[in-house]
Image (cartoon, coloured by chain):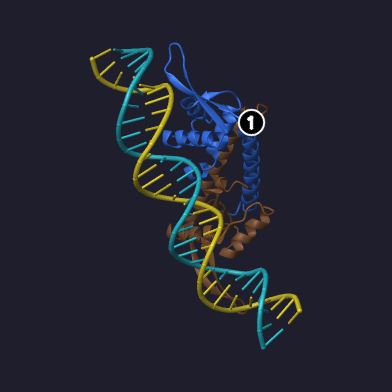
Chain colours: A brown, B blue, C cyan, D yellow
Amino acid sequence: MDTELLKGTLSLLILSLLSRRDMYGYEIAATVHRDTDGSFTWREGSLYPNLHKLQADGLIVGEWEEKETGRKRRYYHITAKGKAALKEKRESWNELCRGVSRILEKSDGQA
Amino acid sequence: MDTELLKGTLSLLILSLLSRRDMYGYEIAATVHRDTDGSFTWREGSLYPNLHKLQADGLIVGEWEEKETGRKRRYYHITAKGKAALKEKRESWNELCRGVSRILEKSDGQA
DNA sequence: GCATTATACATAGAGATCCGATGTATCGGG
DNA sequence: CCCGATACATCGGATCTCTATGTATAATGC
């Protein structure tokens, strides 16, 4: 996978996942990895700074939770502002797909 | 349009356009702008450095041409290496679309 | 019991990309 | 004759993701 193409999709997918339910960082990465059959593998160096940024922008909020038997995890919850941002990012994504598809289809069969 | 998502698509689309026919820089930008109904607007600061890079990597070759009545333009031609790279980038793009779609669809209706 | 692996968070530095600003020069229309 | 569109180019900045590294705890294997 050309990782360069991934840029910008991280925030979109994190927000999308958190719209399902609250999750913690490690769980988010594992879910994406599983749901894409291993196509997407996010590194800690990409994931955690992005989560901090989304929180700083007020799109998500994180809270430490210590389960009875488990270890400490920081669960993230999407905010109203985050849901609005998700809607916009979804639309941007669809617009990007449409645009790229049009160019690729017009050039099809000539490569 | 969230320009962050555009990253990585520039090279893909340039190669795709040049697989139709030879084009010069300004024409490439104008074609993309037109074919996407204005969704994509590439700036000179993105376009020209990228063309130079593609040429440095041997994926395209450029040649100055001075038409009888026109001004000087640098026409770019895709190489065999460029066509191979285009094929790979197309596949990466399809993989990205599949992956993102899966995540978004699973989360649909909950945002 | 003890070592290794998986879980779980975090940051620093490097590399790559795209954009805004700026510069040069030519061509055509009013 | 000026101005906008055409046509190329570069620089610096902002942003993103990755690699590498660090800390700490729980579970697993032997």
Residue A65 visible in this rendered orientation of the protein: yes
Question: Does A58 appear above or below B25?
Answer: below
Residue D20 sits in which quadrant? bottom right
Left or right for A107, reference A46: right
Q: Report in which chain the residue with disc 1 lies.
A: B
Residue positioned 61% across, 27% down in the render: B19
Question: Does A59 appear above or below A75?
Answer: above
Question: Does D17 appear above or below D9?
Answer: below
Who is closer to the viewer here, A49 or D22? D22
Who is closer to the viewer here, B50 or D25? B50
Residue A107 sits in which quadrant? top right
Secondary element type, mark 1: helix
Q: Position of residue A1 (x, y in %)?
A: 63, 47
Mark 1, residues whose alpha carbon is within 10 Å: few (<14), some, or many (≥20)?
Answer: few
Residue positioned 50% across, 37% down in the render: B53
Left or right for A66, reference C23: right
Q: Position of residue A6 (x, y in %)?
A: 56, 48
Q: Which residue is mark 1?
A: B80
Q: Amino acid at mark 1?
A: Ala
Residue positioned 53% across, 37% down in the render: B10
Q: Position of residue C18 (x, y in %)?
A: 46, 40
Who is closer to the viewer here, B1 or B111? B1
Who is closer to the viewer here, A37 or A92? A37
